[in-house]
Image (cartoon, coloured by chain):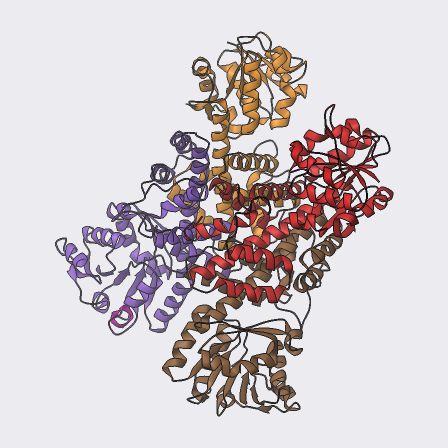
Chain colours: A brown, B red, C purple, D orange
Amino acid sequence: MKLGFVGLGKMGAGMAGNLLKAGHEVKVYNRTREKASALEKHGAEVADSPAAAARNVDAVFTMLADDQALGQVVYGENGILAGLGASACHISSSTIGVAFSRKLAEQHAEAGKDYISAPVFGRPDAAENKRLIVVAAGDPKSVERFTPLFDAMGRRTFVIGGEPWHANALKLSGNFMIASMLETFSEAFTTLRKAGIDHKRFLEVIIELFGSPVYQNYGTVIAEQRFNTPGQGFGLKLGLKDVRLVCEFAESVEAPMPVATLIRNHFVSAMANGQEALDWSSLELVVARAAGLSDKR
Amino acid sequence: MKLGFVGLGKMGAGMAGNLLKAGHEVKVYNRTREKASALEKHGAEVADSPAAAARNVDAVFTMLADDQALGQVVYGENGILAGLGASACHISSSTIGVAFSRKLAEQHAEAGKDYISAPVFGRPDAAENKRLIVVAAGDPKSVERFTPLFDAMGRRTFVIGGEPWHANALKLSGNFMIASMLETFSEAFTTLRKAGIDHKRFLEVIIELFGSPVYQNYGTVIAEQRFNTPGQGFGLKLGLKDVRLVCEFAESVEAPMPVATLIRNHFVSAMANGQEALDWSSLELVVARAAGLSDKR
Amino acid sequence: MKLGFVGLGKMGAGMAGNLLKAGHEVKVYNRTREKASALEKHGAEVADSPAAAARNVDAVFTMLADDQALGQVVYGENGILAGLGASACHISSSTIGVAFSRKLAEQHAEAGKDYISAPVFGRPDAAENKRLIVVAAGDPKSVERFTPLFDAMGRRTFVIGGEPWHANALKLSGNFMIASMLETFSEAFTTLRKAGIDHKRFLEVIIELFGSPVYQNYGTVIAEQRFNTPGQGFGLKLGLKDVRLVCEFAESVEAPMPVATLIRNHFVSAMANGQEALDWSSLELVVARAAGLSDKR
Amino acid sequence: MKLGFVGLGKMGAGMAGNLLKAGHEVKVYNRTREKASALEKHGAEVADSPAAAARNVDAVFTMLADDQALGQVVYGENGILAGLGASACHISSSTIGVAFSRKLAEQHAEAGKDYISAPVFGRPDAAENKRLIVVAAGDPKSVERFTPLFDAMGRRTFVIGGEPWHANALKLSGNFMIASMLETFSEAFTTLRKAGIDHKRFLEVIIELFGSPVYQNYGTVIAEQRFNTPGQGFGLKLGLKDVRLVCEFAESVEAPMPVATLIRNHFVSAMANGQEALDWSSLELVVARAAGLSDKR
């Protein structure tokens, strides 16, 4: 297929690379051009604007940091909506808010264009190694048509019936599940450390108990306090953004989520204590600090 | 070896059965005698008192519901401390409080007797099918001597260095990890249900994402609200007890655990709303109720 | 002075009435005209639009329910910004968000117009009886000029140095103090009721202890569960709005407010359980319900 | 009347002094004798033991720090129960737990002795200046008989019908109301400080709004961070103890108190960060620290 890809950050670069490997033609656009150029040697064509990346393609992917960044490449004369052809599809993979996703779906429909939400689970190494989980929702025929693209980027694709925003709601809820695990590890490790008990031994038990790679990976990161992971990892500010979006979504349907709001407060505390550049698993430092454990950073 | 086993509830019956299958001589005691008699056909000898079960054995196991129930079989003229021989060991597998475990270790030491903490992870079916995880702590030589017993009851044994109460602290912290997962599932499912999104589809994504049998099992129970599981499962009252013990342990080492205390409140709310006889995963009903979802029980 | 007043709800009607009593000329506007007409007999002139109310006056007051409602009377060809003269002042008394207040200040400055924030504390009876507390911030000369107006509406005026949004931040923080008191009463009363202790006797002790009319008034309302107060009182939906604005303000300055977020969740639960039309003190029902106390409404 | 008074700390010394001023004969006992001797010049007789203070009196007051300290003067051969005459009354003014108060009532009844709970509200200066609020519960005739004593110590006496423990439950609930106010002030001040807004100006508004001396006093202490008040004030460790007792009481009647548990966590954090010797209003430091405000102590 002829594709566009806008947003070549840590996640997008890997995803676009896998689309190229799968044999598709891909026009790529990134605000800082170097990241786009890096894909040229793998066969990508570098576009000068989001509109250019969206012109004359079957589908254009977007993978941006947040609602605002996505809005900047969608709207305006150089934006995706301006460039996208009548029968073409905008596949939005960013982790954005439910309200914004609903608005995008409406705006694309009004413009006679197709819109699919296809957010992904996985960190940058999973994006590179085709190990993402893709959750796709939108017009069933359209989703079916593009499923080979999702399969080219990840280890498994879940097609969700219903509106595109359902996929965003699921993605946000999944990130909440992970964030909650981070908080839980933080509280358990902190208490054990204060009791003089080896929290890494505890982690071994938990790894056996849950049998989950996610517990193993994040548990190890937190146990060893390896929070400074530039280029890889998932930034704390993005973690706060996602939990905020979960809370806003929950409030919009009148569902209290006390653990989500608690974690949101902890992320705010992390920001206030200078952890913006660390991985979101550095949530642990907030819990440890409250327990009087000194900050070794 | 010659063994005693006191406490033949849903967990203890399976554990004692596996010790018998492994070829050990086991004297069993239970407050209601029928449960003890049921093990006679598998070769157990029924004892008339905890003291009798502890007499002339290498080790006596205890598997009771809580601190109080354990205290009732340990103390007094018919208690384990009275019956246990000088070189014999009391292996305590109950999920008890850290403070009580410390006290028991002291009292056994004063009486010249051995004391090991060896709490287990797993539900009744895991106890029966030798799938428990055992966490053992105590005198290293003694723990080494009895490790074959632990291996006979479970799929894996973790020997924790240090004081017996360390094993109890780990067990309680592990249960907190599970309880936290229950709360997290409850919040995510509730919000998705209120949004009109299929929460069972979400569960499939989460099962793929975490790759954990624990997430799969509990997630399915909660998604289907199968909370009425007499004879199996883990009662809500025991869940409250465990989270209370975690909180008390944390406070004793001056470590705040905000999610643990939040869950404790939710378990209290569950008790107040008549969920005492349900599985602890019925925590979900507390979250759903707060979101205005009617109680279908 | 020549004044305009836009927004004649439960609060605005009393405030405009007191400006009239103080001898000022007041042009009033309300979306539903009847409320404006009711002030005609007290000397008000009824305007056909917000712009008309703002034309040829020294200052125009606005007293609307929320950011959105205020935006609707400020913007557009019939809006206040369109009607307000060059040297005239928009005095915003609504409880709005800090971010929106900042934006309004900028927009008025750009348009060469004056903008003061002067939110008020007090319920409708206090508005009517000139018992409000006014918190005013803006250009010092301008605030000084209009202070007689504030004094005409309330029992006391606090002039806050600094930007207009400071007054909004103070107002929101004050409402948080009250909301927190509501939650605290709810928790104490609920626990005492469950213990079989007369919570109204407890209230007498608290009234003596705190010596605060606010504690006396709200404490009595909650103790007697008199939450259905149409025409008077402060609606639960507005309470949720205010706590949400507090939380957003706090997050914008990276300050976690755990009690504020807890109360926000409780208001969300109240909405989910059909309390939208009740007074915000019906927060109590959320706490009581979690404790298994049946809903007598 | 002939009275005994056991426990002459910051509170007890003032209370005993006022009983002496009212013309009663008072035998006083304190673990460290100096504090007892200080009252000799005001006419007190110094007793050698709690039992001696309780012998041949109409009533003996106790005012100790916590359950444990009270237990130490009640039990044993030199304890109050041993010394107290058959028709005499033990008036317990300490802030103790509900469960312990129930137990004391039973034990006194079994021993044929009278027991009244009469905890007090007020800080040491209120104890000295006869400004306490006394909440008394017990046998109605007995409470009536001793009411002049309560009136001699405070500005107002509330006689609560029902069991002695009801008075303790009310006292604990009242302290929760105050602790909640401390937390609320802390969150509001912290957010305003981070926003660059004068939180002392906010305090003035709040003082006007609530019209409460308690808000004025504590609000000022917190705004000025005057937490180091040896000899006066109410220690943080006692604050934690009281909130813990509230939580235990609430859990015993199956009532969740989320703000109480949140504050409990904050007090634990305060202990973990070395605030044990500060006033309980130093709760503010926990909130400020989470918001990244540096500790100026």
Identify the image quadrant of residue A19.
bottom right
Q: Nearer the viewer, residue C269 or B179?
A: B179
| Residue A275 in sight here | no
From the image, which quarter does the N terminus of chain C lie in?
bottom left
**Above or below, D41 relative to B215:** above
- Spot occupied by residue B248 in the image (x, y as percentages of width and height): 63, 40
Residue at the left extreme, as displayed: C41
Q: Nearer the viewer, residue C54 or A79?
A: A79
Q: Nearer the viewer, residue D90 or B93?
A: B93
The total number of labels drawn is: 0
**Above or below, D169 relative to C95:** above
Residue at the front extreme, as displayed: B41
| Residue C116 in sight here | yes
* Residue D204 is one of the magenta-drawn residues: no
- Spot occupied by residue C172 in the image (x, y as percentages of width and height): 41, 54
Q: Measuring 47% from the left and 38% from the top, which residue is drawn there?
A: D177
From the image, which quarter does the C terminus of chain C lie in?
top left
Is residue C37 found left or right of C172 in the rendered image?
Answer: left
**Above or below, D127 relative to C37:** above
**Above or below, D139 relative to A162:** above
Q: Nearer the viewer, residue B183 or B17?
A: B17
* Residue C80 is one of the magenta-drawn residues: yes
- Spot occupied by residue A171 in the image (x, y as percentages of width and height): 53, 68
Q: Which residues are magenta?
A: C77-85
Q: Measuring 22% from the left and 63% from the top, which residue is drawn there?
A: C31
- Spot occupied by residue B79 in the image (x, y as percentages of width and height): 74, 28
